[in-house]
Amino acid sequence: MSQLQELSLSVFKRLYQNAVSPSHQNATIDKVNKLIRDSISPPPEKGSLIMGSVGTGKTSLMAIILRNYLIDIEYRLKSLVDSGKAIIDYDSGYVHVLATVDRPDGWQHIASYASFWYGTQAQLVQTLRNYYMEGEEIQSVGFPPSLIKDRIFIDDFGRAYSDQAGWNTYLQEEYIDFLWREKIPTYLTTNWTWADMQQCRSGLKYPTWQRVADRLCDSAWIGKIEIVGKSLRQ
Ligand SMILES: Nc1ncnc2c1ncn2[C@@H]1O[C@H](COP(=O)(O)OP(=O)(O)OP(=O)(O)O)[C@@H](O)[C@H]1O
Ligand SMILES: [Mg+2]
């Protein structure tokens, strides 16, 4: 893992800038508490549940984790690109690596990298809802391809999305269960505290989220990061 905080290849910059809002794109690691800093470098193979009260830097930290993930891939591909053995082609959110081969067109697709989804919980719900017809069984059609990725980033989890017991909850429950079963590294920010999570797991608080909270607390899948302190907003 390089210690660089910047992305250098334009294709990776574009991926990052398309995903992260301008107010979080320039988040810097030196504003992050030392213990937390150490826990995300090198990028964790597990997901992270980033907790903290309003304005403490949760979304900024998640943006840094995404950036480090991309920097790490970029670092591994750069020598191939610099030596002219590969080119990187950006296509609808994927990075495709093409290597030189003895073929008339000269190039062969060898791999796709940097597959991730990044958005708010509300956008996640919208993406899920748009994919299914009301009442359709997930089991028969699977999940939206845009949500089947190597890394998943969900901002603002637990903002009490409407329709407490209905369709939205069902779709999210099934999707989170899928991420948990497949152990796909998933990073979330939330204003919930660890105590909220525990009360939710035991059904004392937000009972409709019980199954989701239980999975998010599985330390084999997701590590917890608690940011303490006051809002950093000026
Ligand atoms: N690592 C960082 N680097 C630079 N600025 C930061 C960083 N962390 C926080 N800030 C500053 O604090 C502000 C709030 O940070 P951020 O939006 O990440 O907090 P949050 O915990 O996600 O807030 P909310 O609970 O409202 O979603 C940012 O707009 C930025 O100005
Ligand atoms: Mg935030």
Image (cartoon, helix red, strand yellow):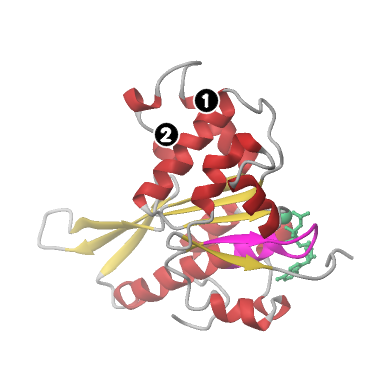
Q: State the CA–CA distance, disc 2 to disc 1.
A: 9 Å
Q: Residue at x 32, y 23 (%)?
A: 140
Q: Residue at x 53, y 71 (%)?
A: 7
Q: Taking the image as four quarters, which one is ligand 2 found in? A: bottom right
Which segment is the magenta one? 48-64
Identify the secondary structure beneath mark 1: helix
Identify the secondary structure beneath mark 2: loop
Q: Are marks 2 and 1 in contact (CB under 8 Å)?
A: yes
Magenta-colored stretch includes residue 130: no
Residue located beneath label 2 in the image: 144
Q: Nearer the viewer, residue 178 or 17?
A: 178
**Is residue 91 at all visible to an observer of this figure?**
no
Coordinates of residue 102 in the picture (x, y in percent): 10, 62
Q: Quadrant of residue 232?
A: bottom right
Amino acid type of the residue that numbered disc 2 sits on in the rendered structure: Pro
Report the disc number at residue 77.
none
